[in-house]
Structures are given as structure tokens and as C-alpha cells.
Image (cartoon, rainbow, N blue to C red):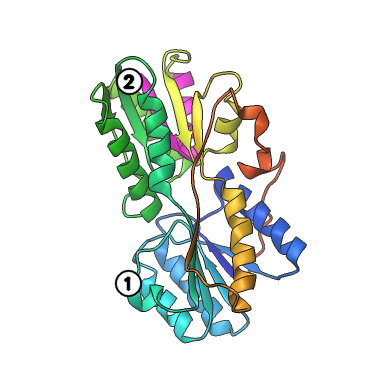
Amino acid sequence: MCVLFPHLKDPTWVAQAESLYDEAKRTGISYDLFEAGGYGNLSTQLSQMDDCINSGKYDVIGLNAISGDGVCSTVEKALDAGIAVIDSINGTSCDATVTGNPKFHQVAAKYYQVAKALGDHIAKQPGEKKILVLAGPEGVTWSDDSMKGLKDAFAAAPENVIVATPRGDTDATKQLAFASDALTANPDITDIVSVAVASSAAMVAVRDAGREGEIKQYSWSPPEDAYLAIPDGTVAAVSSDVVPIQQRMVVNEAIRLVKGELDYKTVAAEGLIITADNFDKIPRTDVTSSPGASPVFHYAP
């Protein structure tokens, strides 16, 4: 397999890299993992995919797309070359030329449902809410779907008001600036709902503002520190898209796809709401990485 990640800058993708490694080792497949360095680097990901196609050494490309539609012509190129493509995690929005190809398969997270489940949970909590949402970059399928899910959930309860939705790459420094600026501009914020590393940034911003205990914090696709902050109440709830399980699914679906054993196009993971009440009942490695996990990088000339 050639596996393409947007980046390895936060615990969400580190957890996926770890589960990919473990499942590949268990099943005996080999793979190379390439990361593009961030959601602003579509051209890097396309170049990496081209290199995988032209190398002639891969049976499958496991694609975690930076852009839902920006990758489609290169996906079509891979399929034309006889290389199977698994569209995983982030999702693409390619047309039937791609999706109808028997070598194209999806291992998806239903990010609309993942985020909406969290929004529904928040909407059930008592009181009026002024909400900051940190949803990640615009134009990326998972982020846009998540934003829609939250908006739909909050629209059903008019006492929930979204006061700010700064959008941008899931870079810790950028997300910390978003959260800090929003808290300064909107001192009436009562709740923060954030994704991945943005949740880590939000916790720092709330602490720096001296508002711990005043603002309820929630996360979807939670990073390790947000997940581990549930028992002490720092984070009230998360909606996990069980990303480690998804990468295990990618490996096994790749094996079945190459063997011609798949008779369906999509398999999906839905959100799991985790609070202090069920925290101890869910295996950590279904949600995030094991303690101390970190990537090792190699330069490929």
C-alpha cells in the first residue's frame, strides 16, 4: 500500500499511523506512509500520489484526502493505471467516473453524524448557550460536513447560539489564536465545541483566559489530551470517530479489495459519545493512540 496522510502534526493522525502500523504488522501487508505537511499542501499530496502511481510498486493507495474534489483527477489516474484506491477518513467528492470504478472503495467516517451527535448532546444540556465552534479548514469534506452537522443540531434549539466559527488549518498555533481572539471578542461565550487539535488549543486558551470552570468544552474527533480530560470534567463530552478503528478497516478492506472479495462500495464508522459516565468502559486504543506513541520520519529522496 501507498498511504497518504494530510499531516502528522497532531495526536489524531498519530493514532491513525499507530493503528495502521499495528494492523499491517498483524496482517502481513507492507506499506509506505507519506504525509503532506498540512491541509494547505494539496500540491504536495498530489505529487506524492503521482509518485506512488508512477513507481509501479503499489497495489493500493490509501488516500486521506486534503481536498474533497482537488484529488479526483489524480485518483482517476491511479484507477486507470490499475491501482485500487481506498478513499478513507476525510472523504472525497469525486464524480461517477471515479466512484463507479470497481477498484474505488470508501472507508468513511460520517462526520455529519459524528458532529451532529455531539451537537444534539450539547443541545440537551440546560441553559442558554453562546457557542464558539472550531471546525477546521473550509473546503475539506470532513470539516464542512461537521460544521453542517453542528449547525443542524443547534438550529433545533434556539437557545443555542453560535457566536463565532473561525476556520483554518488544524495547526495548533493557528487554532490557539482563533480561540484566544474569539474569547476576547466574545466574553459571553459559554461553550466551546472543537475538532482534533483545535480542542487542545481551546483548553489552553480557556486556561490562559482564567475561565476554567466557566466554559464547557466539547470535542469531536478528539485528540488525546481532550479525551483524557473527560474524567476530571475539563472536557464535558466528546464524539469520537474511532479513527484507530478506521485505519484498521482500511488495511483489511485493502486486502479484500485486492482479492476481489468486496461486494459493496462503502463501509462507515459513526460517532461514539463519551462522557465521564462511560469513559472507563471504552478501550483507549479505539479512540486515540497508546501512551507515548510518536511517529518516526524518514527522508525519501
Residue 283: percent from left, percent from top:
68, 38
Determine the image quadrant of residue 185: top left
Residue at image position (60%, 75%) is: 261
Name the kind of residue labelled 2 in the image. Ile
- Please tell me whether residue 265 belongs to the stretch shown in magenta: no
Residue 52: percent from left, percent from top:
55, 77
Q: Residue furthest front?
A: 263
Name the kind of residue labelled 1 in the image. Asp
Mark positioned earlier in the residue sequence (2 or 1): 1
**Callout 2 touching callout 1 (CB < 8 Å):** no
The residue nearer to you, when weighing 101 against 66, is 101
Q: Is residue 192 left or right of residue 274?
A: left
Q: Which residues are magenta?
A: 188-208
Residue of label 2: 189
Q: As displayed, is residue 151 above or below residue 25?
A: above
Q: Is residue 57 left or right of residue 174?
A: right
The numbered disc on residue 95 is: 1
**Is residue 251 among the parts visible in the rendering?**
yes
